[in-house]
Amino acid sequence: MSESFLETVRTRLEALYSVRLGQFASVGFVGAAVDNLALFALVELTVLGPVVAKVIAWELAIIVIFVINERWTFSDFGSTDVDAIGRRFLRSNVVRAGGFLVTLSVLTGLVYGFGVWYMAANVVGIGVGFFVNYSLESLYTWQVQHDER
């Protein structure tokens, strides 16, 4: 392997496993709370099933998570003009789709395959999807590997 490839890998790993991981996890707990509250309300107070309700709850949580990450976790990355923030928000939704598919697959598999209560299945799915989301958000939404400091 070339030295530049190894250096690139090292730089990206350092960028991922920084103080931001703790901040990202903290924000993730807030997002998980929003997700779970919305999921519970949508399933218990409407005619929606857990899978459709999860899709709606996920987007509500994504909005909250994005705003907090934009203002706190990754506040020193990227331009603050409205167009740049809008592009990051769209990119965040696209990037988080991978983590969402993991989360939704876990929820669906546990609920319909093993009879697990939908709220417990959602918490497990969120935990599994966290690592996918953190890696993709760090590298693609806020591009922390380009940290010039």
Image (cartoon, helix red, strand yellow):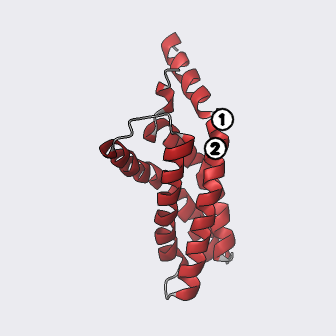
Can residue 2 be seen in the rendering of this structure? Answer: no
Which residue in the protein does label 1 denote? Answer: 19
Residue 73 image position (x, y, % from top left): 57, 42
Question: Is residue 139 shown above or below 96?
Answer: above
- As rendered, which of 21 and 74 lies closer to the eye? 74
The alpha-carbon separation of the residues under discs 2 and 1 comes to: 7 Å
Residue at x 53%, y 80% (from the top left corner) = 42
Residue 119 image position (x, y, % from top left): 66, 73
Check if mark 2's residue and mark 1's residue have beta carbons within 8 Å.
yes
Mark drawn on residue 84: none
Tell which residue pokes out farthest to the left in this image.
Answer: 83
Given the image, on which type of amino acid does mark 1 rest? Val
In this rendering, position of residue 12 left or right of residue 146: right
Q: Quadrant of residue 120?
A: bottom right
Question: Is residue 34 shown above or below 74?
Answer: below
Residue at x 40%, y 50% (from the top left corner) = 89
Question: Is residue 90 shown above or below 36?
Answer: above
Residue 24 image position (x, y, % from top left): 61, 46
- As rendered, which of 94 and 81 lies closer to the eye? 81
Tell which residue pokes out farthest to the top in this image.
Answer: 3
Which residue in the protein does label 2 denote? Answer: 23
Secondary element at image label 2: helix
Given the image, on which type of amino acid does mark 2 rest? Gln
Residue 135 image position (x, y, % from top left): 55, 41
